[in-house]
Amino acid sequence: MRILIVDDDAGLRALLRATFESFEVEVDEADSVAAAERRIARARPDVVVLDVLMPGESGLELCRRLKAQAKTRGIGVVLLSGGAGEGRAQAREAGADAYLSKPFSPLHLLGVADRLAGGPAGVPLRLAEAADEEGQLLLYARDLRHMLDLERRQRHLLERAYRQTVAALVAALEQKDTGTRYHSERVVAYAVELARGIDARLAVDSSAEYGFLLHDIGKIGIPDRILGKRGSLTRAERKSMEQHTVLGEQMLAEVPLLAGEGLRVVRSHHERWDGQGYPDGQGGAEIPLGARVFAVADTLDAVTSHRPYRRARSWSHARAVILEQAGRQFDPDVVDAFRQREGDLRRIRRELAVA
C-alpha cells in the first residue's frame, strides 16, 4: 500500500510516516496541494491523507478535483480537520471516502487507509478520539505501545521460524555426519548448562546458543567419503576435515544472530587449552569462553554417542576423559563446572536419549 500524506504540519507528517512505515507501508509526503498534485502525477498513491486547512488551496479543493477526474477517482481520500461542526458535511460534499477530526489515533487512521486500499494491515479500527492536546499525546503513547508489542511478537515469530529452519538444516547435517539424532540438541543443552556454572551472561547469550547449534555447519563443505569414513583419516583427509571450522565461520559471517560469541564458537570449538588445537593454535584464556565451554560439551556427547568408526562409550568413560584432560585439552574451570553440574547434565542425557 502506498499513502500520500498532505499536511503543512511537518511534525504530524513525521509521526504518521513513522507509524505507517513500521507496518511496511510506502509513504510519500507533500506540504501543499500543489506539491501533492505533482507527486500524484509522478506516482499514483492508493490513499491520500489530506488536511483540510492548509496555506493556499484547501484540501477540500484537491479532494473535489481528484474525485472529478476518471484517472484519480479510484484513489481513496481521507480528510483530516481540526475544525468543528461542518467539517464532516464538507468532506462528504467534496467526495471524501473518510473523515477524521484532529486529534486522532494514527493507528486508527492507518486502519481506515488500509480498508480504503482493500487489504488488512492488522491494525485496530478504533474510533477513539481525544478532545485536546493532552489527549492526543495519550493516543500517540497508546499507539506506540501497541506498535512495540506488535514488533516484539513479529520478532519472536521470525526468530522461531529462523530457529526451526536452522534446526532442520542441522538435523540433516548430523544424519550425514554422525548418523544419529539429537546430537546438536544435546550439545546445546550441555553447553548452556555448563555456561551457567561459568558465566551467567554466556548462558543467556542467544548468539552463543546459535553458535553451539551450528558449530559443525561447515561440514556441509566436507566430502561424504571423509565424513563417513569408518577407519582413521589420512593426513590429507584430516587437514580437509579441520577446514570445517573456518568454512562454518565464512558461511555464517553475515548472519546477525551469530555476530559475536556465536561465530567465535563456530571457529574455535576445536582449539585446546594447551594450544595444540585448530584452526589457530590458540591456548588458555585466549580461546573464546564459549568455545572452551562447548569443547567439553561436544566431547561429552561424542564419547557417549555412536559414531561411524566406533560404538558409544559409557558416561563413566566420558567423565574420566574430561577429568583427565583438564589443563590439557580443556579449561580447568569448565571441567570444574562439569563436576558441579554433572547431575543436571545426566538429566539432559536421559531426556534427549539417542532415538
Image (cartoon, grey):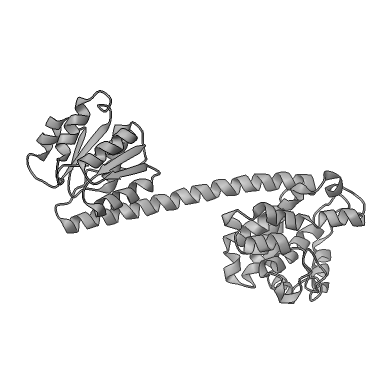
Tell me: residue 217, above or below residue 347: above
Q: Residue at 82% across / 72% down in the picture?
A: 325
Q: Is residue 71 visible?
A: yes
Q: Is residue 45 visible?
A: no
- Near-viewer residue (152 or 38): 38
Q: Residue at 22% across / 51% down in the picture?
A: 9
Tell me: residue 179, above or below residue 193: above
**Relative side of 170 to 40, left or right:** right
Q: Residue at 22% across / 37% down in the picture?
A: 78
Name the spot of residue 50 as percent of width and height, x first. Answer: 22, 41
Could you tell me which quadrant the N terminus lies in? top left
**Relative side of 84 to 210, left or right:** left
Name the spot of residue 331 as percent of width and height, x first. Answer: 74, 74
Name the spot of residue 355 as percent of width and height, x first. Answer: 74, 47
**Relative side of 64 to 302, left or right:** left
**Direction top: furthest residue:** 70
Name the spot of residue 99 as percent of width and height, x first. Answer: 18, 38
